[in-house]
């Protein structure tokens, strides 16, 4: 029998609640397919950090590395200084496991209300995916500060862009575009100001594009891209962009297709040299934690991305269909985190 061995980092705030439902759906779909799911919980996040002073204890990366994939809820808490868990836990895993494709689909499901007048701005529907670079850019921690706290304070935050890093994510984005009906790739950057990195990205898209003659390409500066995401999102198919631009536009993309409660993501290592990690785009939402109010749909859709990555696109499609059916009937019904998970899982049994 097929076995999925999943490392689980439920994390902080609503993390454990949404992960519980993600796993319930994973188990339901796996059971129907005769797949055995085993999970290992990792106690990481704010509580662990307060208790031990460690965000990612020595050896944990090696343990995580042994799994087929990782499911992460959310990390972060106001009681922990900003940046500590983000850098020492989340970004450390993304970098160590070479999650260079941060995949963030944005699809408006039938029945979901968008803040946009969709009939006017996107009568063809909204269905695109952002391929956000995940290991470079301004996220590398390459910077520093001088004379902190003085009027002469200086801070730098250098964006790192390597040909190797840009080329591999661009090639992945082209391949994804090639596999989609519209075969269209948009590079989002800011080469009118960030000329060095901008030209590297632009040239790389041009050169790699020669390998994908049937994929059409477009370019947009990131500021203009935000306009089109709000006024003409139907034009996008696959977007490839750097780590920080991708972070920003995927929150906007999530809002456009019904909110952060539905936005899924995969931190993918396409080469399989380390496990990929799947997580909702949203954060730990400490204000509603423990109340059963969080929408687990983003985590459940992240489980679908996980199934696809684990070589079961059929099961990924089944989960997406179950979510789509649930969303279509949702209207204004108010259900608990657990109830939404149970309803979606029931459709898969
Ligand atoms: C995300 C988050 C993270 C990011 C933070 C928590 C480090 O905003 O996954 O989008 O910026 O990548
Ligand atoms: Mn973000």
Image: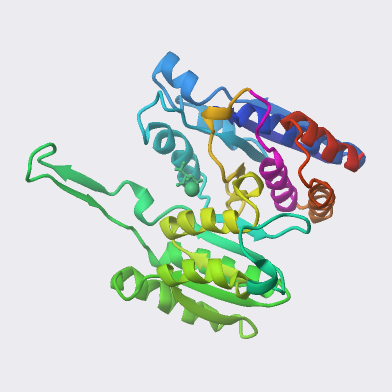
Q: Is residue 176 visible?
A: yes
Quadrant that contains the C terminus = top right
Q: Position of residue 154 (x, y in %)?
A: 14, 48
Picture quadrant of residue 21: top right
Magenta segment, which residues? 291-310
The answer to which of 59 and 89 lies nearer the viewer is 89
Give the percent coordinates (x, y) of residue 218: 52, 80
**Left or right position of 12 against 32:** left
Q: Is residue 269 magenta?
A: no
Looking at the rendered image, the quarter that the N terminus falls into is top right
Number of on-image labels: 0
Is residue 112 toward the left or the right of residue 96 in the image?
right
Q: Mainly helix, strand or loop, the magenta region? A: helix
Residue sitting at the far top: 51
Residue drawn where x is 66% and y is 41% of the image: 69
Residue 296 belongs to magenta span: yes
Name the spot of residue 135 as percent of width and height, x first: 44, 52
Image quadrant in which you'd find residue 214 = bottom right
Vertical relation: 310 (above or below) 108: above
Q: Position of residue 269 (x, y in %)?
A: 58, 52
The residue sitting at 60% across, 72% down in the picture is: 236
Q: Is residue 135 above or below residue 161?
A: above
The answer to whether residue 270 of the structure is visible from this angle is no
* 349 and 32: which is toward the camera: 349
């Amino acid at each position: 029998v097929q076995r999925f061995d999943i490392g689980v980092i439920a994390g902080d705030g609503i993390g454990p609640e949404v992960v519980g439902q993600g796993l319930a759906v994973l188990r339901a779909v796996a059971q129907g397919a005769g797949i055995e799911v085993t999970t290992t919980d990792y106690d990481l996040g704010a509580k662990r950090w307060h208790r031990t002073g460690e965000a990612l204890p020595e050896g944990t990366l090696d343990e995580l590395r042994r799994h087929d994939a990782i499911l992460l809820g959310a990390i972060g808490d106001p009681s922990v200084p900003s940046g500590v868990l983000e850098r020492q836990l989340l970004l450390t895993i993304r970098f160590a496991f070479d999650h260079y494709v941060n995949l963030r689909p944005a699809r408006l499901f039938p029945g979901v209300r968008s803040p946009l007048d969709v009939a006017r701005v996107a009568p063809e529907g909204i269905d695109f995916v952002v391929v956000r670079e995940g290991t470079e850019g301004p996220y590398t921690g390459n910077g520093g500060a001088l004379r902190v706290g003085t009027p002469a304070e200086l801070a730098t935050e250098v964006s790192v862009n390597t040909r190797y890093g840009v080329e591999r994510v661009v090639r992945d984005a082209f391949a994804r575009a090639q596999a989609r009906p519209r075969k269209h790739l948009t590079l989002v950057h800011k080469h009118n100001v960030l000329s060095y990195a901008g030209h590297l990205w632009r040239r790389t898209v041009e050169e790699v594009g020669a390998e994908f003659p049937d994929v059409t390409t477009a370019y947009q500066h990131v500021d203009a891209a935000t306009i089109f995401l709000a006024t003409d999102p139907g034009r996008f198919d696959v977007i490839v962009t750097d780590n920080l631009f991708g972070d920003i536009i995927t929150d906007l993309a999530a809002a456009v297709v019904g909110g952060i409660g539905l936005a899924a993501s995969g931190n993918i290592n396409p080469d399989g040299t380390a496990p990929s990690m799947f997580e909702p785009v949203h954060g730990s939402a400490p204000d509603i934690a423990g109340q059963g109010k969080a929408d687990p749909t983003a985590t459940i859709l992240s489980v679908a991305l996980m199934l696809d990555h684990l070589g079961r696109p059929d099961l990924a499609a089944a989960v997406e269909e179950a979510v789509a059916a649930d969303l279509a009937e949702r209207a204004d019904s108010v259900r608990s985190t657990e109830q939404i998970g149970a309803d979606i899982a029931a459709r898969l049994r």
